[in-house]
Image (cartoon, helix red, strand yellow):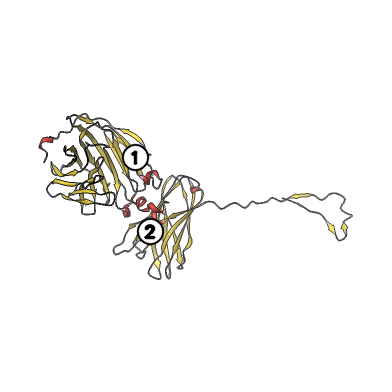
Amino acid sequence: MAVIVSSCKKGGVSKESKTPAPVVSVPVVPTLPAGPVLTVPMAGNAFVTTLATGGSETVTATKMAGWTNPNSIFSAYFRLGTLGALTVKMKASVPSGSSVVKVSINGTSFNVNLSGAAYTTYEVGTVNITAAGYVKVDFQGLSKTSTYFADVSDLEISGAAIASNVLYANDPANFYWSRRGPSIHLKYTAPANTEWFYNEVTVPVGQDNIGSYFMSNGFDGGYFGIQVNSATERRVLFSVWNSATEVTTWTRKGTDVVATTFTGEGEGGQSYLLFNWVAGNTYKFLTQAKPDGLGNTLFSAWFFAPELNQWRFMVTWKRPNTNTYLTNLHSFLENFRDVNGYLGRKAEYHNQWARNASGTWTELTSAYYTGDATVTNGQRKDYAGGVNGSRFYMQNGGFFTNYVDVKQTFTRTALGVAPTVDLTTLP
């Protein structure tokens, strides 16, 4: 923009001005648009990571709630792939009174004063992101004049670090699954008419968090593996789905094995053995599928633990209107407790073999690595798979940095020694 400056008197131009007035350029400062702001909902991205004794803290379908205990900690997570400044704000409501809370962004703490029952966006602070990966935001109450520290519905993030490659759970219809975390699978290539499937699983020490299912022997129609159900309970689990038209029933079961039914993620027969398996030890799994010649298939499973030094029989399930051997052999790793979705787990899957109906053992040395909808829909990226010598591995949960893309084939080193199990003497 240019402004013309001249010297004027009432009634005309001054006689003293013999030359044209100079043109003075005045720079115009443009109005910069506000940078992008992303809203991270707590319902899909926050967890109670420390629950104080007697604490009522929880994450609901809309917010972080029940925040009354100063010793409880909420944590929220989102992933950044761009470096630079990150500014964080929080949208909160204090039902009555006022409070002061500590909010830590990757360990850098800020005290935030909150008041007012209406949801208000409060400035937390700005930090510098120096490496790609998940950002952890912790919330802990410091002081309050009434019952609650706050209800928190969202974080608002902005700055150079969110310019691109930002990831967090943004699909409310699937927040339950996002909070559980990504499930990943290894699919093995097996020969035709596979009657027996053998696999071994080792869970490293410290990777056996509550809610973990280390599924070893999966097949079309069922799965078999070990779980961590609580701080005091662990299970060996073997399940077979119902057929399209009839119910799967058990024909025999092993000592201390519970046989029942399941619903929810499909319907079928479920059996389990309470057994306190130990992280760091290697467990063996053996599954058989055999058509009975009457239009049904009999699915059976056995479990071997070093603590027992013997094969334990689980159950034989009779699946009606099914005439098949084992197909679609696979293993998977999942967390089945959404409140523990911030915890990680890892397992090694090794020494896979298939035996066909003619009695020939084949070593399975390749596996195709895939993920569930939480992976493919980009809700989380804390998953990994690969090979460590003669062992495959899978890892998920815990919001770790170095994920491994799915849809690739891994090949392990062959061992060349078939399982030394006498199939004719199994219990």
Q: Quadrant of residue 314?
A: top left
- Image quadrant occupied by the C terminus: top left
Residue at 32 percent across and 53 percent down: it is: 338
Distance from Cα at disc 2 to Cα at disc 1: 29 Å
**283 shown above or below 70:** above
Q: Nearer the viewer, residue 174 or 200?
A: 174
Q: Position of residue 248 (x, y in %)?
A: 20, 46
Image coords of residue 231 (percent x, y): 23, 54
Residue at the spot 45% in from the left edge and 65% down from the top edge: 114
Q: Is residue 310 left or right of residue 45?
A: left
Can residue 203 be seen from the camera position used here?
no
- Please rate how many residues cluster around mark 1, counting C-alpha atoms within 10 Å: few if below 14, some from 14 to 19, many from 20: many
Q: Amino acid at mark 2?
A: Ala
In the picture of the structure, the residue carrying the numbered disc 2 is 61
Q: Amino acid at mark 1?
A: Thr
SS type, badge 1: strand
Disc 1 designates what residue? 370
Q: Are marks 2 and 1 in contact (CB under 8 Å)?
A: no
The image quadrant of residue 417 is top left
Q: Is residue 10 left or right of residue 421?
A: right
Per the rendering, the mark at residue 107 is: none
Is 112 in front, or is 322? 322
331, 154: nearer the viewer: 331
- Classify residue 53 as left or right of residue 301: right
- Percent coordinates x, y for residue 27 in the rendering: 69, 50
Image height check: is 192 above or below 2? above
Q: Secondary structure at mark 2?
A: loop
Res 394 → quadrant: top left
- Please state the total of marks drawn on the protein image: 2
Estimate how packed mark 2 is, as few (under 14), some (14 to 19) or many (20 or more) residues with alpha carbons within 10 Å.
some
Residue sticking out furthest to the left: 425
